[in-house]
Amino acid sequence: MSMKLFVTSNGCLFSIIVIVLSWLVLLAEAELPPCSIPWRLPCPLPPWPHTYNMQLSTQQYFFSSPDFYDNATVAFAALHGVVGIDWANNYGHPVHREETLAQQAALIKAVNPTTRVFVYRQSELALNIFDTGANAMYDPSKASSWFVLFPNGTIYNDSTIVGGFRMDQFCWDHRNPDVRDYFVNQYVGSAFNQTTIDGIFYDDDGGIWQERQNYPDYGDDYRKAVDAAQQISLNRAWELGLSYGKHAWQAWLTPTIPTSDDTPSNCAQKMRTAISMKDVPVSFPTFYNGACGLPWEQCKDLKQQLAAFLIARGDYWVFFHAVYMVERRIRS
Ligand SMILES: *[C@@H]1O[C@H](CO)[C@@H](O)[C@H](O)[C@H]1NC(C)=O
Ligand SMILES: *[C@@H]1O[C@H](CO)[C@@H](O)[C@H](O)[C@H]1NC(C)=O
Ligand SMILES: *[C@@H]1O[C@H](CO)[C@@H](O)[C@H](O)[C@H]1NC(C)=O
Ligand SMILES: *[C@@H]1O[C@H](CO)[C@@H](O)[C@H](O)[C@H]1NC(C)=O
């Protein structure tokens, strides 16, 4: 998108035309219809039959562990309808995350084949713990055009130490069509042929600047263009996933849910909003109250939340309970 080429005395108009044309080209790549509820992403229904079985309507996300989760954690995961596995599963191991996430999914499925397992993919950052990430990141032919660059032309690199190894974090430049193809078909797509994987958790789906504190002053136009292109990649990945029978975790929308601190009218308004979402996939959160596993965590609203869920729920709703901190359980 070399806008500068078109900037003449009436450069502003030309720039606008170029931006609009770029948008049209990008939008033509994505065919998923917009969500019926106002939201920046589509919200397709999961590609499997709906269920009102309560156990299969539960959802939980599992965090870090230096190796595969221990058997107690696997057994707990396998009690759920839908679980997600974080990038930091097996964080003691610096490579092959595509394979280890699929293997962890298989270990959970072996205990309960009806549990649907989602695995992590990062949509803003290229990470070297994924082989498909590393293969692109250290390929010199991609250094100048595949990643967000600092103004001096070097790759934006949020390198960090995880356990005993160096994890480099570059930002995909989704404006490059080759990046979009690679992101969709190779990086995310590496999960689509895995029978033990039911879907993808797309981290940082809100834009590439979400977690980047130490970025220099990129202009607004640049940021918006990269963000817009990231959304196109996400749309395409979701769409391809659906063709493989895989879902996107972020397709579940999240309403604001009632709490015991609400006034009756506040509560009624929240319930009306939730009920208006019957026809879209909804992840009904109870996690703000903590995991209920430790004394300082308040779970006073849990029964009411379950009641609210049962009153409001549609076909593809899940009761999302507490992010599960595996290591905290192991330590405590
Ligand atoms: C964990 O489960 C696996 C598979 O069932 C079993 O082979 C292994 O012995 C178990 N490990 C422990 C520590 O119980
Ligand atoms: C390029 O800019 C980044 C960010 O300001 C800086 O950390 C890096 O050292 C610079 N690299 C070179 C080769 O100047
Ligand atoms: C990223 O940062 C790490 C740690 O400072 C460094 O070793 C590596 O060479 C950097 N890579 C690039 C492409 O900037
Ligand atoms: C899945 O496997 C088939 C057959 O090997 C291959 O043609 C296809 O490209 C694979 N899809 C992805 C997304 O890797």
Image: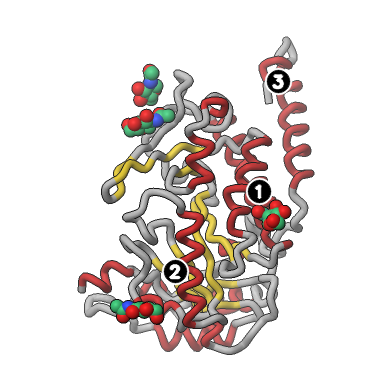
The residue to which callout 2 is attached is 61
Q: Quadrant of residue 34?
A: bottom right
Q: Give the residue at mark 1.
A: 185
The reply, left or right, for residue 166 in relation to residue 309 is left
Cβ atoms at labels 1 and 2 below 8 Å apart: no
Sequence order check, earlier mark of 3 and 2: 3
Name the mark nearer the viewer: 3 or 1.
Answer: 1
Dot 1, how many residues are within 10 Å of its Cα: few (below 14), some (14-19), or many (20+)?
A: some
Q: Which is more toward the observer, 281 or 248?
A: 248
Residue 8 can be seen in this image? yes
| Closer mark to the observer between disc 1 and disc 2 | 1
> As displayed, is residue 44 above or below residue 145?
below
Q: Secondary structure at mark 1?
A: helix
Identify which residue is drawn at 63% across, 65% down: 247
Q: CA distance from mark 3 to mark 2?
A: 47 Å
Q: Residue furthest top?
A: 9
Residue 328 at x, y percent in the picture:
26, 69
Mark 1 → mark 2, Cα distance in angstroms: 25 Å
Classify the position of ligand 1 by quadrant: top left, top right, bottom left or bottom right. bottom left
On the image, numbered disc 3 is attached to which residue? Answer: 12
Type of residue at label 1?
Asn
Name the residue at 65% across, 48% down.
185
User: Which of pointers 3 and 2 indicates the residue nearer the eye?
Assistant: 2
Q: Measure the C-alpha gap from mark 3 to mark 1.
A: 36 Å
For the residue with label 1, is its CB less than 8 Å from the closest atom of ligand 4? yes
Question: What colour scheme does the image use?
Answer: secondary structure
Residue 74 on image: x %, y %: 40, 76
Horizontal side of residue 228 vs 72, given as left or right: right
Give whichever of 30, 69 is nearer the camera.
Answer: 69
- In percent of width and height, residue 219 lies at 52, 27
Quarter of the image with the C terminus is: bottom left
Amino acid type at mark 3: Cys
